[in-house]
Image (tube, rainbow, N blue to C red):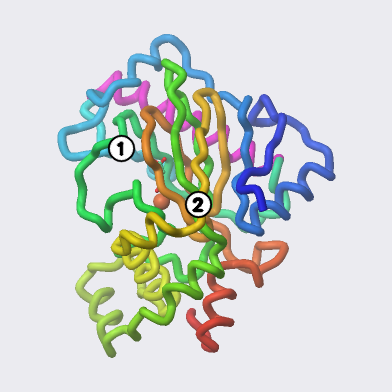
Amino acid sequence: MPALEFFETIRFDEKLLNAEMDRAIQAIENGKVLFFPNLKFILNEQETEFLTPNTLDAKSKNISYDHRRQQLKGTSCKVEKAAYLQAMMHRFCESSQKLVATILPQYQPHIHIARTSFRPAEIEGRVTSFKKDDTRLHVDAFPATPNQGTRILRVFSNVNPLGKPRVWRLGEPFEKVARQFLPRIKKPFPGSRCLLHKVGLTKSYRTLYDHYMLQMHDQMKADINYQQTAEQETIHFPAGGTWIVMTDQVSHAAMSGQHLFEQTIHLPVTGMAQPELSPLKILERLTEQKLV
Ligand code: SIN
Ligand code: FE
């Protein structure tokens, strides 16, 4: 199955035919990337000045924006410049919401808009611990923020001014990954997940679903042999292009590139057209138990 589903869209609020919406929801729920090679997030001249790692503060690898609290984190910009940066990120947040509303309208009543991120640093050659190394194939799962089964839908736009692509690898379908790694995953230590929440190490309760997802994430990244031999495809996402991925389901690795916007959107499994295709339902079927 090809990893990408192409769309001709050139505007974030473009009206689409019903057939296009059907194609989109089918594709994304089956683990494909919705790819809009000609959908450019346009920056004005002043905004292009933010396209440098200097926009980041010393300890951050991306700038994050919480549209609800109107709060910006991770930047060295102050006062007026910070307000201008925030306005740019707010516009990306709104643009990606419009895109999801037009291409995946069925999700509209269910979604929750989470963080917006801007990534002005080159990702190739960055040194991190293996668990944080996104150049290794993984499905998204985060230690401090349990998803409790909720889907992670992400909109990405490559805004590189020099035409540099964002290079990703895309791996095997979720069920194949799960079948490979589940047998290696131990049950959580009794009481450990309550304790994590009580002492504030997780923002909410780490469900069994979160336990299995996090273990899959870590074990995929730790397995060098798997990284090299798993069925995979390298994709060049062009500058001036946009793509939408359910990153909890799609095995992915980001290899190189600089200057990216990303919007995270959460979708409850009950908002899907086919909930049985979700990581939650697949893991519940394979482990023969309720996980949330
Ligand atoms: C990731 O989600 O693993 C990283 C994506 C990127 O920065 O291109
Ligand atoms: Fe990821």
Q: Kindly identify which residue carries mark 1.
A: 62
User: Label 1 is placed on what type of residue?
Assistant: Asn
Name the spot of residue 139 as percent of width and height, x first: 44, 59
User: Label 2 is placed on what type of residue?
Assistant: Gln
Q: Does residue 113 lie above or below 213 as drawn?
A: above
Left or right: where does residue 263 sit relative to residue 190? Answer: right
- Give the camera-side residue of 289 and 235: 235
Name the spot of residue 194 as percent of width and height, x first: 29, 81
Residue at x 28%, y 90% (from the top left corner): 190
- Give the camera-side residue of 204 and 164: 164
Callout 1: CB less than 8 Å from ligand 1 = yes
Please say whether residue 272 is one of the residues in the magenta stretch: no
**Visible residue check, residue 145:** no
| Residue stretch rendered in magenta on the structure | 78-102
Residue at x 43%, y 31% (from the top left corner): 89
**Mark 1 or 2: the one toward you:** 2
Label 1, label 2: how far apart the Cα atoms are: 27 Å
